[in-house]
Amino acid sequence: MARLTATDRNRNENAVRAAMERLLSGDLPPGGKCDLKTLASLAGITRTGFYPKKNRNGTTRPGTYQHLAEEFERRRAELQEADEIVDPRDAQIERLKAEVALLAKRVKDRDQKVTELTEFKTLAVSRLAAQHAEIEELRAALAAGGTVRSLPKPLIPASAPFGSCS
């Protein structure tokens, strides 16, 4: 594997810094996030340079651009702590969580209203059934010739009821 020249390394570091500024300002490419993978992609380098390397003897050494990755992570964390959300998808997630909470409350309220209306319907139907049964009993008693008396027929069908204030 070829070694990087100082010129190539400086050019790559400048590209990483430019991509870092772009991402931290919220200018994300389509389908990209504010992360190291997108940073490496925008800078045109492999992301392996952001991570520590192992020497042949088992010791670790810093990656070529690990210091830039650490700077990126630190600056992104500072922006998030200051409520300057860099990743618009984070803002979208927060908005959707609030919307889900609102919709859950509306569903709960509607379920409660449906329960109340179902109870009212049950009560109304039972009262109607009781009234119907009473009417049927009175009709049966009238037909049997019991002590039920019929009310007199009104003289003028379209007139106001007795005791009307009009």
Image (spheres, helix red, strand yellow):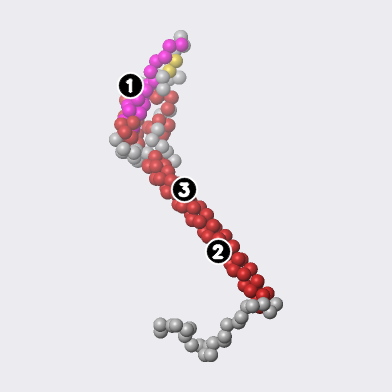
Question: What residue appears at the point 63 percent right and 74 percent down from the top-left corner?
Answer: 138
Question: Residues at badges 3 and 2 in contact (C-beta under 8 Å)?
Answer: no
Q: Is residue 88 left or right of residue 130?
A: left
Question: What residue appears at the point 63 percent right and 78 percent down from the top-left corner?
Answer: 148
Measuring from the top left, give residue 139's x and y in whole percent: 65, 76
Q: Is residue 104 magenta?
A: no
Q: Which mark is residue 104?
A: 3
Question: What residue appears at the point 59 percent right and 62 percent down from the top-left corner?
Answer: 126
Give the distance between the C-alpha atoms of the residues marked 3 and 2, in whole angstroms: 30 Å
The residue that label 2 is drawn on is 124
Q: Who is closer to the viewer here, 164 or 73?
A: 164
Disc 2 marks a residue whose amino acid type is Ala
Provide the secondary structure element on which disc 2 rests: helix
Foreground mark, 1 or 2, reads 2
Q: Quadrant of the N terminus?
A: top left
Mark 2 residue crowding within 10 angstroms, few (<14) / some (14–19) / many (20+): few
Up-down relation of residue 80 to residue 157 (above or below): above
Question: What residue appears at the point 57 percent right and 86 percent down from the top-left corner?
Answer: 153
Residue 71 image-quadrant placement: top left
Question: Residues at badges 1 and 2 in contact (C-beta under 8 Å)?
Answer: no
Residue 73 image-quadrant placement: top left
Residue that lies at the very extreme toward the front in this rendered image: 147
Q: Quadrant of the C terminus?
A: bottom left
Disc 3 marks a residue whose amino acid type is Ala
Foreground mark, 3 or 2, reads 2
Residue that lies at the very extreme toward the top in this rendered image: 57
Disc 1 marks a residue whose amino acid type is Ala
Q: Which mark is residue 6?
A: 1
Give the distance between the C-alpha atoms of the residues marked 3 and 1, in whole angstroms: 58 Å
Provide the secondary structure element on which disc 3 rests: helix
Report the span colored magenta.
58-76
